[in-house]
Amino acid sequence: MKKKLVLVITLALCVGTLGWEKYSAFAMSTETNTPKENTITLFENTTLLSDNGTTIGILAPQTVTILNTSQRRVGHGEGYLVPIYQIFTWVGKAWIMPFNAALGEQVPSQANLELFGVEPIYFDPGLTKPTWIQLAPQTVKIKSKWGDRYLIETQNGDRWIAPRYESLYGMEEVRREVQLQNETKLLRSPSGLETGAALSPQKVKVNEVWRDWYRTESWLGPVWFKLPEMDTAVGQSRFNDNHVSGRIRHMMGINLLKEELRLHADFIRDPLVVYCSSG
């Protein structure tokens, strides 16, 4: 009887160990990397995870030091990989997979941000305190940048924004004439949403530049086009001489932009903001 009991316990331990290792391999990437940013700010309560992905505690909003970075697969089927971070806590080393956080610190910036969709603005960088005001598509002035969150100037003071739709960081305001040598397609934005129209070879006045993309006013409203290398720009007179390299943010749902703008049109009170009821 004792031999049978020992055998059963041994088998149970073996099965448990194999199951633990299998789950650990699934939950956590085997590779860890030295973080490029050594801190991360958590804006909401964040779950603490053990090496095998089980919950071991809850961490309140705060800034913590990152020890290592890795990835974890989530979702159904094959799922997708999301970044996770190892930090030191009162229970020792633990992993976090924050859903509302920002790496490093906010960096001062004097760049422009072109918004293509209706975007909500917030009182805080954690986007937990809404103002119940939305910005219509426009160009805004940035005061600081924190990952994909921006502190911008508004009529009501400085507010935070994290664009959900396409946006252009580092767009320059210019007064410039561009000589087009060939027929050039017109797009709603540099992401590739085409208008179906094109410009014949001619001189075109542009008022904004982002990388090698130019914005002009047309019979379709504001449109963008890419300048081929053989074409030239003349008569340049920049409003802002500080060139800031930009990046494009591709967002799902950009093709629904027109419909969303139409639905929000009734709420527009002035060229800057769209007011929404807090109820």
Image (spheres, rainbow, N blue to C red):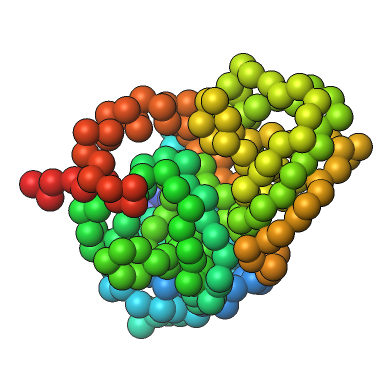
Residue beneath the point at 59% across and 73% down: 37
Nearer to me, 258 or 146: 258
Tell me where residue 128 sits by quadrant.
bottom left
Could you tell me residue 51's position as x and y percent? 48, 62
Query: As drawn, is 236 to the left or to the right of 106?
Result: right
User: Relative to 158, is 176 above or below?
Assistant: above
Could you tell me residue 63's position as x and y percent? 41, 78
User: Relative to 134, is 96 above or below?
Assistant: below
Residue beneath the point at 27% across and 35% down: 264
Query: As drawn, is 236 to the left or to the right of 46?
Result: right
Nearer to me, 111 or 182: 182
Residue beneath the point at 52% across and 63% down: 147
User: Relative to 44, is 167 above or below?
Assistant: above
For the question of whether residue 59 can be seen, the reply is no
Tell me where residue 256 sits by quadrant.
top left
For the question of whether residue 249 can be seen, the reply is yes
Residue beneath the point at 69% across and 68% down: 241
Nearer to me, 12 or 94: 94
User: Relative to 236, is 147 above or below?
Assistant: below
Residue farthest to the bottom, as pictured: 90
